Image (cartoon, rainbow, N blue to C red):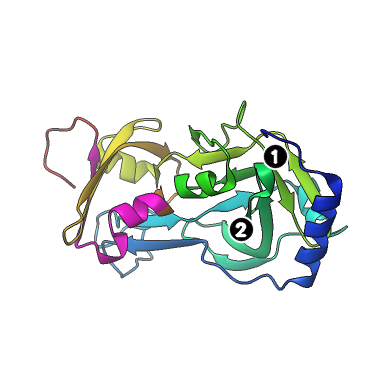
Amino acid sequence: MNSAIDRSYIEQLVRTAIRSSQLPSKANGSTTTQSTSSSHTPPGWVNGEPNLRVSISARHCHLTDEHVEILFGRGAVLEPDKDLYQDGFYAAKQTVMVVGPRKRMLPNVRVLGPTRPASQVELALTDSISLGIDAPIRHSGDIDGTPGCVLVGPAGTVQLNQGVIRAARHVHMNDADAKYYGVENGDMMQLRIASPSCSVTFEDVLVRADSAAKLEVHIDTDEGNACNLDSATEVLLKKSGCKCQDH
């Protein structure tokens, strides 16, 4: 962090967090090319084709087991509140306050589960500006050398020396999806969002492929607002540099 935050101020934040009710917030919003589902493999496919979903990943954080106990009390565990589209992942009931330099803060930042080996905060550019943190664009988990922050929960605080990032846009997909689009894990794709008077093409969408994933693009709040995702009329995904017909 660029400047230290005094202990008395952090203690005041903890007391405020204990008194305050933690208001619910959306972990993510999404739009999809189809609304039906299928019980057949591959995961997420409908009528023999991938069912592309584009989701807005709002600001959130991932925590270690140790940090969950520090922030929410001895013996605390994450309590699932809402399942996310990817199986096994969820928005927890718990939220934290994220504090940046010069005592700037974001309250009620949703915790996503399950826990991870390293705690991490994912923000949009607007969020990082608001906090006064120069958060770099990184792929999730790549936090070496990134800025830190203070996390405040109802039971305590955690000083992160690193872990604040702007998550690079990416697409989750399974092996069948990857074959359909002609891509492999680590490739880059292009996403076009068509909406009234606000169509946008996003480059450098990282492919994150594994056998169990469902086809889903993650963009942040700023990107979702820029393309007016809620009013999208068409969503097209293709391999970067591909001259073939859009899927």
Residue lying farthest to the top in this orientation: 145
Q: Are marks 1 and 2 in contact (CB under 8 Å)?
A: no
Residue 245 appearing in the image: yes
Q: Amino acid at mark 2?
A: Val
Quarter of the image holding residue 75?
bottom right
Q: Amino acid at mark 1?
A: Pro
* x then y, percent, for residue 57: 46, 54
Q: Is residue 15 left or right of residue 107?
A: right
Q: Residue at x 58, y 60 (%)?
A: 90
Which of these two is toward me, 226 or 33?
226
Residue labelled with disc 1: 117
Q: Is residue 215 left or right of residue 64?
A: left
* x then y, percent, for residue 129: 51, 44
Which of these two is toward me, 108 or 94?
108
User: Which mark is drawn over residue 89?
Assistant: none
Residue labelled with disc 2: 109
Q: Which of the image's four quarters has the N terminus?
A: top right
Q: Residue at x 57, y 53 (%)?
A: 60
* Label 2: element kind: strand
Given this view, does label 1 or label 2 mark the residue nearer the observer?
2
C-alpha span from label 1 to label 2: 19 Å
**Highlighted magenta segment, given as a residue range:** 222-239
The mark nearer the N terminus, 1 or 2, is 2
Q: Is residue 218 above or below residue 14?
A: above
